Image (cartoon, rainbow, N blue to C red):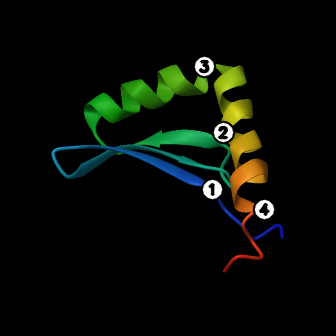
């Protein structure tokens, strides 16, 4: 169960700007704006904790479905 990964990506004009990966446990920016957004999101520990909780709530709950 440890290899399950939760990814949340943000797109603008079909271009990935920012991505949260539960294995890395932080946001990564792919554009100049995305890097700024990632720094902001990573500075909020409660938001990171909430996304990790979504991994446990959403991914691990639905593992038996697929």
Q: Which of 66 and 12 is in front in this view?
A: 66
The circle on residue 33 is none
Whether tag 3 and tag 2 are in contact, CB under 8 A, the answer is no
Question: Callout 3 environment at 10 Å: few (<14), some (14 to 19), or many (20+)?
Answer: few
Q: In which quarter of the image is the N terminus?
A: bottom right
The residue furthest bottom is: 66
3D distance between C-alphas at marks 3 and 4: 26 Å
- Name the residue carrying label 2: 51
Q: Which of marks 1 and 4 is in front?
A: 4
**Considering the numbered disc 1 on the image, is that residue within a helix, a strand or a loop?**
loop
3D distance between C-alphas at marks 2 and 4: 13 Å
Q: Which of marks 1 and 2 is nearer the N terminus?
A: 1
Q: Which of marks 2 and 4 is in front?
A: 4
- Residue 47 at x, y percent in the picture: 64, 26
Question: Callout 2 environment at 10 Å: few (<14), some (14 to 19), or many (20+)?
Answer: some
- Residue 64 at x, y percent in the picture: 77, 76
The vertical placement of 12 against 23, above or below, is: above
The circle on residue 6 is 1
Identify the residue at image location x=78%, y=62%: 60
**Considering the numbered disc 2 on the image, is that residue within a helix, a strand or a loop?**
helix
- Name the residue carrying label 3: 43
Q: Earlier in the sequence, mark 1 or mark 4?
A: 1
- Residue 46 at x, y percent in the picture: 71, 22
Q: Which of marks 2 and 4 is nearer the N terminus?
A: 2
Identify the residue at image location x=76%, y=49%: 57
- Name the residue carrying label 4: 60
Q: Which of marks 1 and 3 is in front?
A: 1
Whether tag 1 and tag 2 are in contact, CB under 8 A, the answer is yes
């Amino acid at each position: 169960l440890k290899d399950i990964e939760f990814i949340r990506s943000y797109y603008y004009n079909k271009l990935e700007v920012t991505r949260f990966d539960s294995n890395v446990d932080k946001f990564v920016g792919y554009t100049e704006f995305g890097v700024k957004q990632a720094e902001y999101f990573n500075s909020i520990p409660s938001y990171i904790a909430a996304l990790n909780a979504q991994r446990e709530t959403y991914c691990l709950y639905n593992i038996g479905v697929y």
